[in-house]
Image (tube, helix red, strand yellow):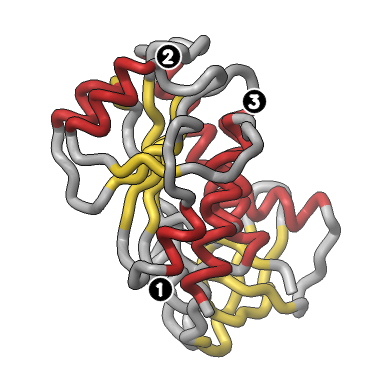
Amino acid sequence: MPRFFCPQPIAVGSTVDLPEAVAHHLHVVRMQIGEEVVLFNGEGGQYRAVLAEIGKKRASATVAAFDPVEVELPYPVTLAQGLPEGSKMDWIIEKAVELGVAAIQPLAAQRSVVRLAGERLEKRHAHWEGVIVAASEQSGRNRLAQLEQLAEFNRFLKAGATTPRILFSPRATESLSSWARSTLPQALTILVGPEGGFTEQEEQAAIDAGALPLSLGPRVLRTETAGLAALAMLAATWES
């Protein structure tokens, strides 16, 4: 059943106007009045609804039932990702959301090729929010991952940590998998560098700020692979 994010109050028995982008999608795929869809507003659970009106820019649905289902990880993970080049960040955000990440913190690191500021940053941030919505719709998540504002790496470290931080480094002597097996599930932040990784100075600054250096194994992973592999490892170890 198609799922759509509808950022407004939803109540059983009410008829809600769907976002214009959703209305356009329904029109393009030629869904019909009377067909069922699932709506969620990010506040938890989802709603089964029946399409009541479909137009090019306007659509509505009557809410029939509420399902309190949740598929969130039992431990919130923040992915602090050094900005990669091109569209890699789209891929990282999409797949991280599918794997259950609770928050994404873009980082401007020394080896980040992409530099964002001003209007360009605002447009990219809005685009990433759209990626989160689409990935949530597809993956069955009823809560949206939080997208933080881009932060310079050293300022991010100085802001202090509300959860333990894990730094992925090829120089680490302990692996994430072994650490997770000996640790209870908990909220944490994982730090992944851009192409080329964090510099030695950045790694040392993170360790000095309390980050725990861990390895993802003997193979060197790309920036678009490392965070996703970490999320999968944690889920395999802790979610069960």
Q: Is residue 95 left or right of residue 212?
A: right
Residue 195, numbered circle: none
Q: Amino acid at mark 3?
A: Ser
* Mark 1, other Cα within 10 Å: few <14 / some 14–19 / many ≥20: some
The residue at the point 56 percent across, 59 percent down is 233
Quarter of the image holding residue 136? bottom right
Q: Secondary structure at mark 3?
A: loop
Q: Nearer the viewer, residue 84 or 216?
A: 216
Q: Residue furthest right?
A: 30
Residue 137: x, y in percent?
61, 60
Q: Which residue is mark 1?
A: 74
State the CA–CA distance, disc 1 to disc 3.
30 Å
Q: Earlier in the sequence, mark 1 or mark 2?
A: 1
Q: Secondary structure at mark 1?
A: loop
Residue 116, numbered circle: 2
Q: Which residue is mark 3?
A: 87
The residue at the point 74 percent across, 74 percent down is 1
Residue 110: x, y in percent?
39, 12
The residue at the point 57 percent across, 40 percent down is 226
Q: Earlier in the sequence, mark 3 or mark 2?
A: 3
Q: Is residue 189 left or right of residue 58?
A: left
Q: Nearer the viewer, residue 150 or 43?
A: 150
Q: Nearer the viewer, residue 22 or 123?
A: 123
